Image (cartoon, helix red, strand yellow):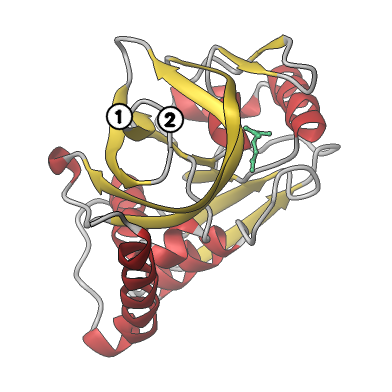
Amino acid sequence: MRSLRLVWIYPDLLSTYGDRGNALVLERRARLRGVPVQVLEVNSDQPVPRDGHIYLMGGGEDLPQTLATRRLQADGGLHEAVRKGAVLFAVCAGYQMLGVEFGGAEDQPVAGLGLLDIRSGRGERRAVGEIVADVDPALQVPRLTGFENHQGVTERGPRARPLARTVLGTGNGDGTEGTYAGRVLGTYLHGPALVRNPGLADLLLSWALGPLPPLPAEAEELSQRLRDERLAAAAAQQPS
Ligand code: GLN
């Protein structure tokens, strides 16, 4: 690979709560390891390149979420990239869109992209606030911290594994948070997720690049401070 190609899908429709920070963190953590990076921002009126290594999707409101799904389905580029083994990381609306179906603006079912074996509908109340969750030990990623704001609840089928178990917050709505299958990973976490969870960023990078050396401690100082601060704030909210 001459350089790592990151593809940020539809920033014009899907980018709430600073989700763009996820692309910045992947770029920085690859560059610090000497890997040249190209970041491609693809708006919803442009074709999705089929030769990216990592694809990123952010959160969105209900109508842009439905529109983005139709356009990605018609375009076909994301499906082809995933078939060829690209990594896909999707947040909140992006996560729901990867499934078989999600609840649209009037709660009518909308067909999803079918890239993850999940279905999302609308929960009884909106989940808003800090979320903390412990990742599937097979992935060797430290505890997740994030911010969630969604109405959707998500069920998994047999071909998808939960990313994490919730300690605080709602996530999928059944005590789990996020889903992964192969190199496709979705989560409800904003924050942005990869800024608060560099371990998750490195998991995605390692799927694309292979095993990675750790970064020097001084490069991790700011994100460690942010993690400590957010996890302490969440612990203060938890019932003892
Ligand atoms: N519209 C979706 C929901 O409310 C996703 C929201 C989001 O991306 N923040 O469940």
Image position of 120 (left or right of 131): right
Residue 22 or residue 109, whichever sits in front: 109
Q: Residue at x 81, y 30 (%)?
A: 63
Image position of 149 (left or right of 160): right
**Label 1–label 2 contact, CB within 8 A:** yes
Q: Residue at x 28, y 39 (%)?
A: 164
Question: What label does residue 162 carry, if any?
Answer: 1
Query: Is residue 184 positioned above or below 10 on the image?
Result: above
Q: Amino acid at mark 2?
A: Asn
Query: Is residue 159 positioned above or below 50 on the image?
Result: above
Foreground tag (1 vs 2)? 2
- State the image coordinates of residue 57 (x, y, percent, origin top left): 60, 43
Is there any visible trace of residue 116 in the rendered image? no
Question: What label does residue 54 carry, if any?
Answer: none
Q: Earlier in the sequence, mark 1 or mark 2?
A: 1
Alpha-carbon span between mark 1 and mark 2? 9 Å
Which residue is identified by label 2?
172
